[in-house]
Image (cartoon, rainbow, N blue to C red):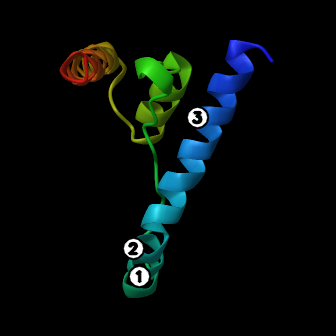
């Protein structure tokens, strides 16, 4: 098995875990706010801090984040991942 397959599998499992973890909250929001569109968007980080840059940009696009702010948000996200990884070493 290639490492990319493992990372993709891992990210998929984590995406499913996040969806399941927040499922009851999303359902409650949908029931309480019938006129709102409720959607969960996950920012999932893979093994050893691996992230898929395209997924981050797609999620930011779905949130209507201005193009000029996306690189700054991604850089801050990567910095937090690196800091969290350094704390576990």
Q: Residues within 10 Å of mark 3 (few under 14, many from 20)?
A: some
Disc with the residue nearer the chain's start (2 vs 3): 3
The mark closer to the camera, 2 or 3, is 3
SS at mark 1 in the image: helix
Disc with the residue nearer the chain's start (1 vs 3): 3
Residue 55 is situated, as x and y percent measured from the top left of the image, at 53, 27
What is the quadrant of residue 2 in the picture? Answer: top right
SS at mark 3 in the image: helix
Residue 40 is situated, as x and y percent measured from the top left of the image, at 46, 56
Question: How far apart, in angstroms, are the residues tagged by discs 2 and 3?
Answer: 22 Å
Query: Residue at the spot x=49%, y=17% of the render?
Result: 53
Q: How crowded is mark 1: few (under 14 residues within 10 Å), some or many (20 or more)?
A: few
Q: Do the residues labelled 1 and 3 touch (CB within 8 Å)?
A: no
SS at mark 2 in the image: helix
Residue under pointer 3: 11
Residue under pointer 2: 25
Question: How far apart, in angstroms, are the residues tagged by discs 2 and 1?
Answer: 5 Å
Residue under pointer 1: 28
The quarter of the image holding the C terminus is top left
Query: Residue at the spot x=32%, y=26% of the render?
Result: 66
């Amino acid at each position: 098995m290639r490492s990319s397959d493992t990372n993709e599998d891992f990210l998929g499992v984590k995406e499913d875990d996040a969806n399941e973890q927040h499922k009851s909250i999303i359902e409650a929001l949908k029931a309480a706010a019938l006129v709102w569109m409720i959607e969960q968007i996950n920012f999932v980080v893979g093994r050893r801090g691996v992230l898929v840059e395209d997924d981050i940009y797609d999620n930011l696009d779905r949130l209507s984040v201005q193009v000029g702010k996306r690189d700054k948000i991604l850089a801050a996200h990567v910095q937090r991942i690196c800091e969290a990884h350094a704390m576990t070493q």
